Image: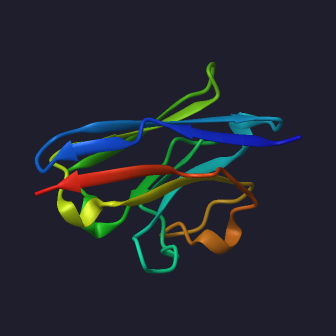
Amino acid sequence: EVQVVESGGGLVQAGGSLRLSCVVSGLIFNDYTVGWFRQVPGKEREREGVSCISNVDGRTVYKDSVKGRFTISSDNAKKTVYLQMNNLKPDDTAVYYCAAAAVWRHRCPSDYFDFWGQGTHVSISS
């Protein structure tokens, strides 16, 4: 059984930092792309990933609005993907979901992700 478990969300002030973690089990971690997606309160989950990383070749992609502020990384030994979020803004407030896909697609669309976590809440106060 594949499991995707996120952690690390919380409430921080604007300008602060958080690090989200995503543990993926039940599949061959090194063969998968892992991505972070978010759902802003009152809206549908965004189709384009916040950031994704391929565990096959290490390539990464970031949504334009988070470039230079967020960094994604992967620890294959721990089967964990991290999203370091710095200089957080109120617009970053959302539920952040982690997901795994067997393929890599440009700009990381959610359609290709098969396994999803339950989400972790991130709230940024102004």
Residue at 58% across / 30% down in the picture? 80
Residue found at the very far right of the displayed protein: 1
Tell me if 23 is positioned left or right of 70 in this view.
right
Tell me where residue 35 appears, x and y as whole percent. Answer: 54, 53
User: Between residues 32 and 39, which one lies in front from this camera angle?
Assistant: 39
Identify whether 104 is placed above or below 48: above
Tell me if 79 is positioned left or right of 87 in this view.
right
Tell me if 71 is positioned left or right of 95 in this view.
left
User: Between residues 48 and 92, which one lies in front from this camera angle?
Assistant: 92
Figure colour scheme: rainbow
Residue 67: quarter of image = bottom left
User: Between residues 45 and 107, which one lies in front from this camera angle?
Assistant: 45
Quadrant containing the C terminus in the rendered view? bottom left
Quadrant containing the N terminus in the rendered view? top right
Residue found at the very far bottom of the displayed protein: 43
Tell me if 16 is positioned left or right of 110 in this view.
left
Tell me where residue 106 appears, x and y as whole percent. Answer: 52, 69
Residue at 65% across / 50% down in the picture? 117
Residue at 30% across / 53% down in the picture? 123
Residue at 60% across / 70% down in the picture? 110
Tell me where residue 116 appears, x and y as whole percent. Answer: 68, 55
Tell me where residue 56 appears, x and y as whole percent. Answer: 64, 42
